[in-house]
Image (cartoon, grey):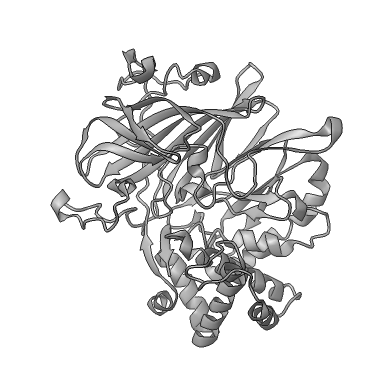
Amino acid sequence: MGLLFSAVLVGVAAHSALAAIPSPIAPGDESGANGLELSCQRSAPWSLPTPEELAFGVRLPGLSSQPPSYGARSNAGSHQTGLGADTFADRPQPTTADRRNDYDVLSYDLDIVVHPETETFVGTVGIGFEALQPMTTMVLDLYDGMEVTAIVTGDGAGSIAGRDDEQIEVTLPTLVPFGATDTLWISYRGQPGPAFSTWDTWNYHGTGVDSFPIVQTISVPTSSGHWWPCKDLTTDKAPGSITVTAPSEYILASNGLQVSRVENGDDTATTKYRTQYPMSTYNFSITLSNYVHWVETYESEATGYSIPIHNFVYPEDEADARVDLASVHESMALFESLFGPYPFADPDVGIVEKYGHAEIQWGTAAMEHQTMTSYGSGFINGTGSYDWAVAHELSHQWFGNCISPATFDDIWLNEGLATYAEWLWLDHAGFTPLGVAAERALAVQPGDGGPVSRPDDLFGVVSYQGGAAVVHAIRRTLGDEAFFEGLRAWVSDHLDGAATT
């Protein structure tokens, strides 16, 4: 049934290869590019740079030539075609000239100091990778407003070979042979570049003397490189960690599970999150404000796991938010019964990560970052009238995050399936019968156009309502039993994959 459903819906390329935290080591004395002190030793204890050191790019974290190691799904495939080939000649040759496909990312480790007063980030990112062909250079996505202060691998200092508005080419210190693994560390600083629509990284909530800054990142579709260096392709997912240092009154919401928060004694705190599950770059997210944070527990009948639900909201909205976010438990139960277990509490892996919401300044819009949805404050009014939005964003954990679009022309596989999940929720809750929702969608005359597989507007009616109508047509063609059996098989067979129409 899974094959039939996949043939009707999409072709999937599974991606995963999860990698491991290197043994940390102390910074060394080798002088590198830009006159900075670079760390190239391979022994001795390691400590993170202080915020002051990072702020001036004085030194990088200790390095290892081996990428970090994280947990992996038992049935997860490789990120990129060619892993496992015995020789470079055995590897299927790339069909694209995109040089980002010269390597497979195994892990990302972000360490960022946030300066709200100057609206700047100062950071270091470690990128564990495997060479898919012999490499002397490496192309990354990074906005040209970000100054690069140091580049280094376990073999020494690299340099900038060239850059344009959106990308940087790095000269590696030595040739990396086909099949070899290494870690590139790159330090940078600056103001994040313009991102999705008119959205702004820096904002405020509250009024008057009670107003407080909020730092929020939204990278969809291709703005990850506007705030951190990465390979911004949805087809190459990787697990990783996100460490953020900020003023102590800021609470961080991010992906995966929080593993530590340390008060630094200088009115700053350093918080670290880690995700063991592969993630598309556009899903990496940090959200910071003076949040009220509480944790609920969803008891999964599908797996027997207790899944934590973390909510981060503005202090002035806490009472309303406790009402408006409560329906996530019922939505989770419905979707687990229809789509299979919550994908980031996989019984085959035995790693239970959370789900949650972080309130942001984005009106009635939201972004389904993996395990932590950024949820517009306009949805919070204390009435539960936007329960459908809670359901829609939750469903993206299956459709969008666990299985991602291979390109953004395939965005209907995210938004069409999530809109259909929203319809399923509305029907389940007794608000709108499924057939009525489908009829309404078909009656819409979109201002945008194009087929669902190549919409003129990525986030328009064709991708959402049009995509959901296609899903409903598939269901009517296959019948309920075959449709949901196929849908569950599609998810379980292609965990951590990237799908195309």
Asked whether residue 456 appears in the rendered view, the answer is yes
Looking at the picture, tell me which residue is in the foreground, 406 or 249.
406
User: Which residue is painted at 47% across and 57% down in the image?
Assistant: 347
Residue 486 placement (x, y as % from top left): 46, 76
Residue lying at the far top in this picture: please name it.
29
Residue 96 placement (x, y as % from top left): 29, 56
Depicted 1 relative to depicted 228: above or below: below
Q: In the image, 52: left or right of 497?
A: right
User: Which residue is painted at 66% across and 73% down in the image?
Assistant: 423
Q: Quadrant of the C terminus?
A: bottom left
The image quadrant of residue 467 is bottom right
Q: In the image, 237: left or right of 459?
A: left
Asked whether residue 68 appears in the rendered view, the answer is no
Q: How many marks?
A: 0
The image quadrant of residue 273 is top right
Residue 475 placement (x, y as % from top left): 54, 82
Q: Quadrant of the N terminus?
A: bottom left
Depicted 488 relative to depicted 98: above or below: below
Looking at the picture, tell me which residue is in the foreground, 342 or 83.
83
Residue lying at the far right in this picture: please name it.
208
Residue 97 placement (x, y as % from top left): 29, 52
